[in-house]
Image (spheres, helix red, strand yellow):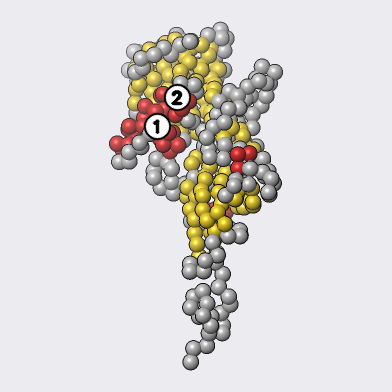
Amino acid sequence: MLMGLASCSGFIFDDEGDCEVTHTMRFRYEKNLKWADAFPSEVKAVNLYAFDSDGVFVKEFSGAGEALADPSYGIRLDLPAGDYRFVAWCGLVDGESFTVPQPRAGVTTIEELTCSLNTIRTASLVEDGGYSDRKLDFLYHGYLEASITDDVSVLDREYTMYLTKDTNHIRIIVQELSGEGLEADDYDIMIQDDNGEMAYDNELRPGGVVTYRPWFQDTDELGVGKDAAEGGLQYINGLYADLTVARMMASHEDDMMLTITRRDSKEIVARIPILQYALLSKRYYEDAYGHAMPDDQEFLDREDEYVMTFFLVNHKLVDGLVMVHSWRIVRHDYDLGTE
């Protein structure tokens, strides 16, 4: 004789409690050039914001630490039934690199949930976006619209938030081919773009041009050719600088500028639209990994590290000789000098 009553699963037996519907948000970071989920290995913190269908803030969820390294990691969504718009800003470990304002339930709108780069303002940059010379924490963004339901036909419901990485490491190498070694302070290197503020949908909001400066700059010995007397490689000091910049947008292709300047004479050695150079490697990765990227923005979102080498002779840029990563020499058809 069956001992139970009709319920969410057909029957409730004597040793069972009431049925409960659970909702869990999972996270995946697959938008990279390996086309593989790197969330467990890269992301160190999660901040998830829930807004109602009208775009008014409801609740924040967060997680951090070793738990995120578990491939099954998820956040339990303790929310009443309804339609929601979820925004994720991941990687806000200590708040030193980026800031998201603390939203207020029933007050803050989704348009107000911006993520801003923390910059340093100076007298000369007060009207712009300031400067950043920090090794930025990795930042990731996600957006998802989903419905929370109390329909008990499915007890365990899962949702997946796909992330986009918004920070990029750029290494600039300067090599003098005349045989003259360089010192770490011979050149000032900077990248400028109006990309320091990102909206809830990860689009850039105008906030003033940010000047990115190296967080590390030094020299190392590099081979430049055969030594005439001894026949071996000749080694001289080349300069390298590491910078971290916020989101790179294809729509800023003509605006994001890299400038290399001689510190003593203030002479500009190179001033180039750096995104045009970054995009030159897109076809290589499409062929190498067998994945077509329909637009330039997808490539910029997937690639997050760039190495560019500039060759000089007597402090003058060698026309047409610039390496992007270590495998390609790029020829150009526009001026690399001052505008």
Give the residue at x 55% y 54%.
83
Q: Is residue 148 above or below residue 199?
A: below
Q: CA distance from mark 1 to mark 2?
A: 10 Å
Indicate the secondary structure of the residue bearing disc 1.
helix
Kind of residue at disc 2: Glu
CA neighbours of label 1 inside 10 A, class few (<14), some (14 to 19), many (20+): some
* Image quadrant in which you'd find residue 16: bottom right
Q: Position of residue 329 (x, y in %)?
A: 34, 22
Give the mark nearest the N terminus, 1 or 2.
Answer: 2
* Left or right position of 34 against 213: left
Q: Nearer the viewer, residue 255 or 328?
A: 255
Residue at the image point whose x is 36% and y is 14% from the top = 333
Which residue is at a point 61% across and 60% down the rendered structure image?
80
Circle 2 crowding by C-alpha within 10 Å: few under 14, some 14–19, many from 20: some
Tell me the amino acid under the disc marked 1.
Answer: Asp
Residue at 52% x, 88% y is 3
Q: Is residue 27 visible?
A: no
Q: Residue furthest front?
A: 54
- Does the residue at mark 1 contact the one at mark 2 (Cβ under 8 Å)? yes
> Residue 36 location in percent, x, y?
41, 47
Q: Position of residue 38 (x, y in %)?
A: 46, 47
x and y percent of residue 4 in the render?
Answer: 53, 85
In-image side of 220 versus 35 (left or right): right
Label disc, if present, on residue 196 of the rendered structure:
none
Res 296 label: 1
Front-most of residues 285 and 292? 292
Residue placed under numbered mark 2 in the picture: 253
Decide: is 188 above or below 92. Answer: above
**335 up-or-down from 54: above or below:** above
Q: Is residue 34 among what the camera can see?
A: yes
